[in-house]
Image (tube, helix red, strand yellow):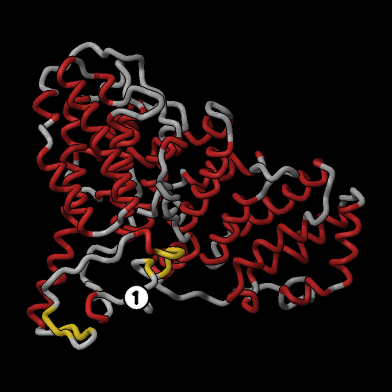
Amino acid sequence: MKNPTRMRCDLGRFFTAVLLATAGGILAPAAGHSAGYDSWSKVEQAQETRDYVLQIREGKFDAAQKAFIADTLLPQLGLEANRASIAAVRQRIRGVALQGVTKPEVVDQGNAAIRDGMLQLVADKNTELLVQVNAMLLVGELQTIDRAPWVGSLNPLAKAAGDAALPLAIRVAAVHGLTRHVTAAAAGGPAATAAAPVVAGLVTSPPAGDAAATRWLLSRALDLLLRVPAQPEAVAAAAKILADDKADLDLRVRAAAAVGGLATADSGIDAAAAVAQITSLARAALAGDLDAATERRFIRKLSGSSLQAGGLSGERGGFTPPPPAAAEQGGGGIFGGQFGGELGAGGAPPILDEDAVPTLACRRNAWRLFTLAEATKPARTGAGLAGLLSGEAANAAADLATRLRELAIDLDKQPDETTLKTALAELQQLAGPAKAAAGTGTPENKPASAPVEAASPFDQPAG
C-alpha cells in the first residue's frame, strides 16, 4: 500500500474563519508602539537586536535582556504594520528572543518573559482578538533547548482552554498548545494530568457558540481522551455522541475511537450497542457521500447543462470514474491526477465527472472505516469493544473489524467512487453484528488499552 495522504487541519485558515465569525470580521486598529520601531523589519535590522543576540549567545540574561523582550520584541505582535504577516512575526519573536542560546536556564528565562507578556495581552480586553489568539498560540509554541514543549506553558494553557469566559478563538489556540504538550509527553505525566479535567469538560459540556470552533474543540477533546487519565463521565458522554445519529459523522467516529479504546469491564460501556452503532455509522458515512454525488448529478441534469469533451457530448447525469489513484502525481488538485496529455479510446481525452465523490472524500472515508475497525477490535494491541463480548457476538465483532480495515485499505489504494460503492455494498451484505451481539457475556480478553497510534496508516483529518 502506498503512503496514504495525510489530511491535516489548516490551523491558520481555521483561526481566520473563527475570528471573522466571533469578531464580525471587524478588526480594530491596535494601539501602542515598539520602542521606536514601527514594523518588524526595522527590529530585525536594528543594531540593538544584534547586540541582544550576541549577549544571550554568551549566556547573559538580566534585566536589560528581559526589557528588550518586553519593550521591543513583544509589542510588535500588536502593530498594525505587521498585521498581514502576524503569524510570521509571532514565530520570529520566539526565534530572535532565543537565537543561538545554548544554556537551558537562559531558555527558561526567555520563555518566561515571552509567556508573561503574551498572557498580559490575552487578559487585556482592549487587545483585538486576532492579537490575543496569536499571543496564546505563542505561549503554546514555547519550547526547550531540545525543542520539547516548555513545561512553563502547561498550566496557563490548561487554564485558558477550560475558561468558559474566554472567546472560543482563544480557547481553540489554548487547546492547540495543550494538545502539543499531551501528545509529546509520556502517558500519565504532568501534561496528561493537567489536561484531564479540561478534556472531560469539553466532552461532557461542549461550549456554545461558533459551530466550527465548537466542533474543533470537541474533536480534539475526543482525541485526547485516550491520552489522559480516564474520566468515567467523559467516556459516557463519548458513548452518547457515538449513539447520536444526528451528530456530525466525524465526531461520531472520534467518539467511537474513544469508546473502543477505553472499553474495559468496569467502564459501563454497552459493547453490543456500540458495535451496532459502529456498523450503522460506517454505512451512513459511505452512503452520505454517494448520495451527495447523486444529488449533484440530478441538479446538473435538471439544469440542462452538458459536457463537451473531444467532440463527445452528453448530459452530466452519467458517471465516469476518476483515473486510478496510481496515476496520481503528488496529490495535486481535487482528484490529484495528471490528466493533461492522457487520451481515452479513439484519441479523445477521458471524461472527468466533476460530480463524482472527490478523492479527498474517499480518503476521509478510508480513515473513518479504519478508525471504526480499531475501535471494534484493534489490529495490534488492546481488546476494543470485541473484548467485552463473548461467543458469536465477539466473533461477529472481530469479523466486522477485519472487513472494515480491509475496505479502508482498498479505499486508500483506489480512492474513487467505484471503490466507495463496492465498500458500501459489502457493508450492507455483512451479517448484522448487532444480532450476534444480543447475548453479551463476561469479557474474554484483558481490559483494553489505548490503541497504538502507529497502527493506523491514516492521519486524523480536520473533520
Question: In the image shown, does 100 or 348 lie closer to the viewer?
Answer: 348
Name the outermost residue toward the bottom: 311
Q: Within the image, what quadrant is residue 406 found in?
A: top left
Residue 100: image x %, image y %? 83, 54
Residue 252 visible in the displayed image: no
Name the outermost residue toward the front: 346
Left or right: residue 345 compared with residue 133: left
Q: Within the image, what quadrant is residue 70 found in?
A: bottom right
**Is 356 drawn above or below residue 189 in the view shown?**
below
| Amino acid identity at mark 1 | Glu
- Count of numbered circles on the image: 1
Question: In the image shown, does 319 or 260 lie closer to the viewer?
Answer: 319
Tell me which residue sits at (35%, 68%) in the image: 334
Q: Which residue position holds label 1?
A: 342
Residue 117 visible in the displayed image: yes
Tell me which residue sits at (26%, 43%) in the image: 407
Left or right: residue 153 compared with residue 457: right
**Is 122 drawn above or below residue 21 in the view shown?**
above
Left or right: residue 377 compared with residue 74: left
Residue 378: image x %, image y %? 35, 29
Residue 360: image x %, image y %? 33, 60
Question: In the image shown, does 317 or 348 lie closer to the viewer?
Answer: 348
Tell me which residue sits at (78%, 71%) in the image: 44
Tell me which residue sits at (22%, 80%) in the image: 346
Residue 379: image x %, image y %? 36, 29
Question: In the image shown, does 455 or 280 lie closer to the viewer?
Answer: 455
Mark 1, Cα crowd under 10 Å, few <14 / some 14-19 / many 20+, is: few
**Is 56 drawn above or below residue 331 in the view shown?**
above
Q: Regarding mark 1 in the picture, which secondary structure is present there?
A: loop
